[in-house]
Image: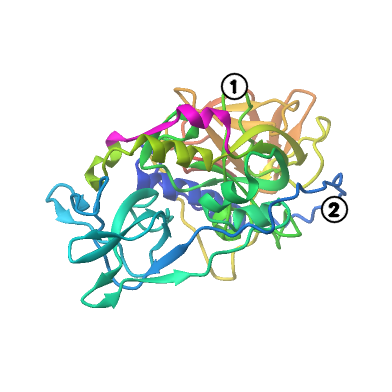
Amino acid sequence: MPCLGAVPAVRVTRARAIAAALLISIVLGACASDPSPLPFSIPSLVPAALRGDAVGVQQAVLTVPLVPRLGDRPDGPLLVEAPDSQPLRLDVGRQVVIAGDPQPGPDGPWVRVWVEPSITVEPGDFYAWLPTTQGGRATMAMVEPRPCPTEATIQTLAGLVQPDRLRCAGSTVLTIDARSGLLGLVPIYDVTPAWYGRNSDQGTTTLFDPGPARFGPDAKTSPELAGSWLEARLPPSVAPLPLGLFLRVSGRFDDPSAAGCSRSIARGAVELGLPAEAPADSVQWCREQFVVSGWQALLGAEGRPIDPLDPQLHRREFRLPQGAMLACGGVGMPPLTIRIDPRQVDPVWIDLPGGGHSMAIFAAEFHVRLDLPRVVSTTGVTLVDGEVLDPDKGKPGLSLCPGGTAVMFDVAPR
C-alpha cells in the first residue's frame, strides 16, 4: 500500500508553512522505499579554525510565565495579542539571551533579552524586557555560557545559539559539509534585503547534520529530526540551494550587507503585538546570519555523486513502522508543472504558478529515462517535461499527494 502524508497547501500562513515544511520530514523520514546508498567517498575538507578561547553569550530559561515589555525602556508597553489586546505571556521553559545589564523598572529590576525562536511556540525572535524577580522569586534560571568550538563544522555551528555563531566565527569565510532542508519556521519580521527572510516565505532553507549515514534508514532527513540547524541566507547572486542533497557550502557571518539591514513587522504578524525593531537590533540580527557565497553538490537525492547520465530522484527513505499509516490530506494546490532536466543537480522538480517550486518525491517504482527525458514507473505511468497535472486528480495509474513544499508520486493501487 502506498505511504502517503501531506497537508493543505493554500495561502501561506505561519501554521501552514510549518506543516508544509514538516511534510518533507514526514515523507523522507517516515516511510517507503529502503535505499541502500553505497559508501561513496567525499573529498576531504579541513574545517576553519574558530576562537576556541571565547565564551558565549549569557542565556536563561524562564522559570515562571512572564509578560514582556517592549520598547527602549523596561517601563514600555506590555506585549499583547490582537484582537482583544490581552497580555501575551512567555511560558515556563522559554529560552532567552540576556542582552544587557539589569535596569530599574516596574516592581524591581528588568533585563533586556532576545527571545529565541521556537518551531512550536509563538512569538519568538524579538527583543523585549523581562523582570528578573517576581514576588521575591527569581524569574529565570541562568544557563552556563558555552565556550566557542575550535573548528567550524555543521555540528559545531548548528549547536550554537545565533549570537554565539557571530561571536565565535566573526567574519571568517567558512566552508562546511551539510545536508540541505526546509525548516517549518517563517519569520515574524519582513527583512530588507528580502533574501534574509520574509513572513510570506514557505519556510527557511537550512543546513543540518544528517549523521554519518547522510542518506538511507539511519540518516536524519530534516532539520527537525537533526535537532539543530543553521539557517542559510542566499543573496540573488547565489543559486538557490537544492533541498534534500548533501552539499559543500561556503559563506560567512557578519556579511557586509548587514550594515543596511532592517526588519519590520510583517502584515501577517501584526496580531502578535510586536513593535518596530530598533535599527541597531536589525543590523545585529543580520550580522548573526550565515550568508552563503557558493555551494557544490557532493551527493544527490539518492545519496550518490551527481551524474547527468544517472539522474537521481527524491525518495522516501524510511519505511513506516508496522501498522502505521499516513493519509494524504493535501488540497487546494494550483496546477503542477513537471520539470525534468538531467543536467541539473536536482533533475526533477515542480513549477507552480507565480514562480514557486515544490519538491517531487517518488516511490521506488519510478526512474528517470534519458532517451526522451521523462520519469517512468514500472507500471508504465509516464511524466514528461512541461506536463501539467491537476493536483486533486492526478492521471490514470498515478497517485498524487500534494503538500505544498513537497508532492508525492505513487503508483495508484490496482
Tell me: residue 9, above or below residue 123. above
Mark in the foreground, 2 or 1: 2
Q: In this view, does 242 lie to the left or right of 284?
A: right
Reply yes or no: does residue 360 show up in magenta. Answer: no
Q: In which quarter of the image is the N terminus?
A: bottom right
The x, y position of residue 249, in whole percent, is 70, 39
Q: What element carries label 1?
A: loop
Whether 141 is drawn above or below 225: the answer is: below
**Label 2 residue SS:** loop
Comparing 163 with 328, the one in front is: 163
Q: Is residue 325 left or right of residue 239?
A: left
Q: Mark 2 sits on what residue?
A: 38
Residue 371 at what x, y percent from top left?
80, 24
Report the amino acid beneath label 1: Gly
Residue at image position (57%, 46%) is 166
Please provide percent x and percent y for residue 49: 75, 50
Q: Residues within 10 Å of mark 2 (few under 14, many from 20)?
A: few
As drawn, the label of residue 264 is none
Q: Residue at x 32, y 35 (%)?
A: 266
Instruction: Tell me, yes or no, whether the highlighted magenta stretch contains residue 263.
Output: yes
115 to the left or right of 3: left
State the image quarter where residue 271 is shown: top left
Q: Position of residue 158 (x, y in %)?
A: 61, 54
Residue kind at label 2, given as amino acid type? Leu
Circle 1 residue: 386
| Residue in front for this viewpoint, 135 or 316 | 135
Residue 209 appears in the picture as rendered: no
| Segment colored magenta | 254-267
